[in-house]
Image: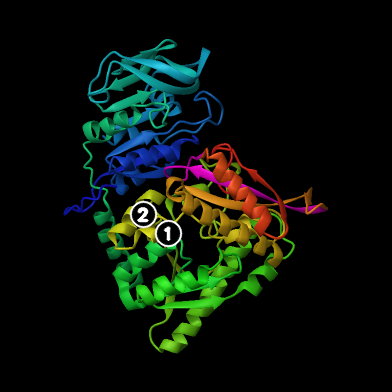
Amino acid sequence: MSRRTADAPLTSKIAILDFGSQYTQVIARRIRECRVYSEILPHDTTAEEIRRGGAQGIIFSGGPASVYAKGAPRVDRDIYKLGLPILGICYGMQLLARDLGGAVESSKRREFGPGKLSVTRAGRLFAGLPRKLEVWNSHGDKVTKLPRGFVAIGTTENSQAAAVADMKRGFYGLQFHPEVSHTPRGSEIIENFLLGVCRCRPDWTPGVFIERACEEIRAQVGEDRVVLGLSGGVDSSVAAALLHKAIGKQLTCIFVDNGLLRAGEREWVREIFGRHFHMDVRIIDASAKFLGLLRGVTDPERKRKIIGNEFVRVFERAAKSLARERKGRPYKFLAQGTLYPDVIESVPIAGNPASLIKSHHNVGGLPKRMKLKLVEPLRQLFKDEVREVGLQLGLPREIVHRQPFPGPGLAVRILGAVTRERVRVLQEADAIVQDEMVSSGWYGRVWQSFAVLLPVRSVGVMGDERTFENTVALRAVESRDGMTADWVRLPYDLLARLSGRIINEVRGVNRVCYDISSKPPATIEWE
């Protein structure tokens, strides 16, 4: 988001219909980077719902299906009658062409990977771009007959209709993926569609978001009170600052020590938010309860749900206690720092339940029956947008630029059973990771860096004696928004210091490994 504060209310919005592409979330990010608000919707969202939502344009995502396959996802045909510009990407282009009278066939020569696009007609979509573009393909079908009113505006070696347009209606189709980094000028193509075709205003800014969010919070909460789960991480910290701005003393922050936190976290939160920002912060030590509930549990989804359920119960009990203490309006709301990626990853893609990536403790991990109503003011934002909002709200950079920490805490970085001893081992190892990353100057250069305790013990030799101890894996990734990530090529001398310190200083560890997996196919966290 731009740091510019707009006087006018937010008006521009693009609806993305999701057909199951692994890049759908990336499309949403690229649109946000152009300072236009984007929202991912199921592919079967009706035309009326899109109209009511106020979208100025629609994007059909890619997807793994073939348009002519039985059960392939479709759209409400009335969408084509809304008078809104449409951009179809890969599967989205093929669906657009087929629905409007064209033809799609399986290609004898499939295209996966880099390709060259020859722009034959620039128009608004390719305005300001060269006639030869590097693009990224991922498809086995192609459009072989254009619908009436469409013309080809770009070709590749394998397709005479790699980019098509009905300029009168504002319908465009791209066989390649402009949203991925492998299409170097792809963001400019998307920006041309947003600003040149849809006539969107680049008004998705921190100032506009804060103004709208405060209004929505006040409208939702009224004069009632709110408890917020404050962890000290970026998301909950920004949520706390936003709610404090919106409702002031109606907010009470609850810091729950669940026994799964970073070393020294409780003291850090008390100092920063209670004494420095003068927020009403209550600290509850529930470590024994959480660790007791997790005893013997090894399945990561069960861990998340157990933690999510117990967090809510703690907040509900705290809300009752606070209401008695205050002798005023009751606490009816629970606020959380849920982000857009949390929502996306916790919802099956394109109606396919098997596509669920993982439940987040503050989305899919919540109990079905809650006495408190949820307030989630950040659920529209990606992580980098949250950081910008935090800075605009006046939070210091050391809070806003903290690396992400999972809501369930170290429970999802301890593979296998969670015990006090295993938590102790991981806390000490992770503290060394953070210390070395900061002192080396690498902490601010990566998205996330942390230690993982594996359910693996191996033979070692320490002090001429045989050991049979734990294995710690190190993880450091670079990312723009957490939706995709690549492992960081840390210097060998830094890795050597990390390994040496962990093995020498953390009792119970004799082996350290480095994770060199990217997302996808792996996730950033191990569970």
Q: How many marks?
A: 2
Q: Which of 75 and 452 is in front in this view?
A: 452
Asked whether residue 225 is in view, the answer is: no
- When the figure is inspected, residue 199 is found, relative to residue 8, above or below; the finding is above
> Which residue in the protein does label 2 denote?
387
Query: How far apart are the two marked residues, 2 and 1, measured between alpha carbons?
Result: 7 Å
Q: Is the magenta stretch mostly helix, strand or loop?
A: strand
Mark number displayed over residue 506: none
Answer yes or no: do the residues labelled 2 and 1 have beta carbons within 8 Å?
yes
Q: Which of 27 and 298 is in front in this view?
A: 298
- When the figure is inspected, residue 251 is found, relative to residue 151, above or below; the finding is below
The residues colored magenta run 466-486
Mark number displayed over residue 234: 1
Q: Nearer the viewer, residue 216 or 307?
A: 307
**Rendering coords of residue 394 (x, y %):** 29, 63
Helix, strand or loop at label 2? It is helix
